[in-house]
Amino acid sequence: MAETEFSSVRFGGDEARAAQVYQGLDPLRPEDVAELVYYVTTLPAHVCVNDLVVTPTAQANSTTVVRS
């Protein structure tokens, strides 16, 4: 789960409804992904990252999230 404009578009610009999608949890943010991209691209040349799986700690799978 990543907090982007997707929920706003999905709910036709209804920002209150879009915000409810992320209520009570800490989703990934664009800044988190950007930081990972920067980290991977600035590793030494002898380091090869073949796979990178990034998920928020509040999400167990595509349908199960833990809300506080």
Image (cartoon, rainbow, N blue to C red):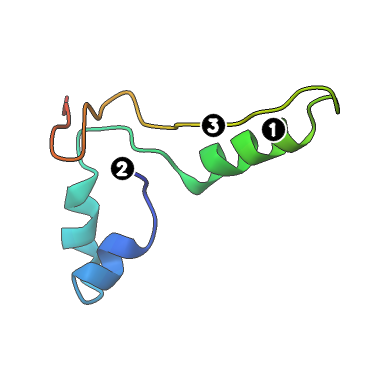
How many angstroms separate mark 3 from mark 1 (CA)?
A: 11 Å
The vertical placement of 53 against 14, above or below, is above
How many angstroms separate mark 3 from mark 2 (CA)?
A: 19 Å
Q: Residue at x 50, y 48 (%)?
A: 30
The vertical placement of 49 against 4, above or below, is above
Q: Residues within 10 Å of mark 1 (few under 14, many from 20)?
A: some
Q: x, y percentage for residue 45?
A: 86, 28
Q: Are marks 3 and 1 in contact (CB under 8 Å)?
A: no
Badge 1 is on which residue?
40
Q: Nearer the viewer, residue 24 or 30?
A: 30
SS at mark 3 in the image: loop
Badge 3 is on which residue?
51
Q: Residue at x 26, y 74 (%)?
A: 13
Q: Residue at x 80, y 33 (%)?
A: 42
Q: x, y percentage for residue 15?
A: 25, 65
Q: Nearer the viewer, mark 3 or mark 2?
A: 3
Q: Amino acid at mark 1?
A: Val
How many angstroms separate mark 1 from mark 2 (CA)?
A: 21 Å
The vertical placement of 8 against 66, above or below, is below
Badge 2 is on which residue?
1
Q: Residues within 10 Å of mark 2 (few under 14, many from 20)?
A: many
Q: Amino acid at mark 3?
A: Asp
Q: Earlier in the sequence, mark 1 or mark 2?
A: 2
Looking at this rendering, what residue extends furthest in the right direction?
45
Q: Earlier in the sequence, mark 3 or mark 1?
A: 1
